[in-house]
């Protein structure tokens, strides 16, 4: 992976709330997904200016196959047309596209669209855009684990590379810094579990089709106010007497309903 690209933020996005957005307007769920695809374009456009160099979007989970066939086929068609339509745009704007997840259950047409998009945009160095399709974090971890010989040693970075390879990502894709889920739900739904070990989590009330560049900007701003300690102490906590430690902890304001408590 391009070194400049790996220096910025990796943001993961669980794009939730398309169905509720549509229901609130008396529209079919598929319309929510269509408007969700517009929100994808807005997020991708806004990302590079915000210091995001890797953006991973949860477009279709391995469990989403359980949805009605008509909804699944709408989602697959939307993905195909997004890839076909946005390919040239991505190339022009330095966006490198990749699809992470299983490919053996996708249609030949979608596979062709993915391969074309990946080939056409491979030189993109501003943003690495990963669309997670037929994706399961647990499955990727299992595939990566199966590549280890029983006597083989592997540290976290090495295992992350294996996971990246297992889901067809660039092996050097960094861990997630910020994980956002829209629509008020607060769960990870089998998305980037290993990669998000120290991600900051942000749960927004916004329904995905309403999400725009300003929401992403506010999310990144909230992230930058957070104190990432990776289990350690901040410099002032380390020197302060125990009685003053609690007051030296940064308090964090979020434009959402997250608790902001970090371990
Ligand atoms: C979850 O909302 C959303 C999905 C399962 C699909 C996400 C797809 C898109 C945003 C559009 C296509 C993507 C691209 C990259 C072009 P939900 O349907 O579960 O909403 P609900 O919880 O309100 O029912």
Image (spheres, grey):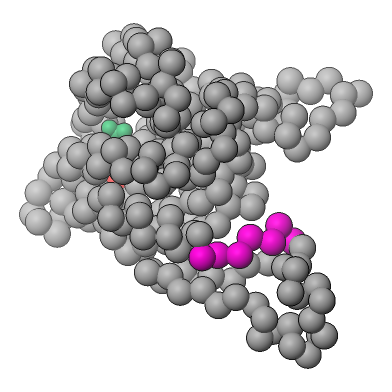
Residue at (38%, 16%) from the top-left corner?
121
Q: Tell which residue pokes out farthest to the right in this image.
A: 151
Q: Tell which residue pokes out farthest to the left in this image.
A: 26
Q: Position of residue 113 (x, y in %)?
A: 31, 13
Residue at (52%, 41%) from the top-left corner?
8
Compared to 190, does 237 lie above or below? below
Q: Position of residue 30 (x, y in %)?
A: 17, 39
Q: Position of residue 50 (x, y in %)?
A: 40, 47
As rendered, which of 159 and 217 lies closer to the eye?
A: 217
Q: Position of residue 148 (x, y in %)?
A: 79, 23
Q: Is 82 in the magenta? A: no
Quarter of the figure that contains the C terminus: bottom right
Q: Is 228 in the magenta? A: yes
Residue 33, located in which quarter of the rendered image?
top left
Q: Which residues are magenta?
A: 225-231
Residue at (77%, 63%) from the top-left corner?
232
As rendered, which of 73 and 247 lies closer to the eye?
A: 247
């Amino acid at each position: 992976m391009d070194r400049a690209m790996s220096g910025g933020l990796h943001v993961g996005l669980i794009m939730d709330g398309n169905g509720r957005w549509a229901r609130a307007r008396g529209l079919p769920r598929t319309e929510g997904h269509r408007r969700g695809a517009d929100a994808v374009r807005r997020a991708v456009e806004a990302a590079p200016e915000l210091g995001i160099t890797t953006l991973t979007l949860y477009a279709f989970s391995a469990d989403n196959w359980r949805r009605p066939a008509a909804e699944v086929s709408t989602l697959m068609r939307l993905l195909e047309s997004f890839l076909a339509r946005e390919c040239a745009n991505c190339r022009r704007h330095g966006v490198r596209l990749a699809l992470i997840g299983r490919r053996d259950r996708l249609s030949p047409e979608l596979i062709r669209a993915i391969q074309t998009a990946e080939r056409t945009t491979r030189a993109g160095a501003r943003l690495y855009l990963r669309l997670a399709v037929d994706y399961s974090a647990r499955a990727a971890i299992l595939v990566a684990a199966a590549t280890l010989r029983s006597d083989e040693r592997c540290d976290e970075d090495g295992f992350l590379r294996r996971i990246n390879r297992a889901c067809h990502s660039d092996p050097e894709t960094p861990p997630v810094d910020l994980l956002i889920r829209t629509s008020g739900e607060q769960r990870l739904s089998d998305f980037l579990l290993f990669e998000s070990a120290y991600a900051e989590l942000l749960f927004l009330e916004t329904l995905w089709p309403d999400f725009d560049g300003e929401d992403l900007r506010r999310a990144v701003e909230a992230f930058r106010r957070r104190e990432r300690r990776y289990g350690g102490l901040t410099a002032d906590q380390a020197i302060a007497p125990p009685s003053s430690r609690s007051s030296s902890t940064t308090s964090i304001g979020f434009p959402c309903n997250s608790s902001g408590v970090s371990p």
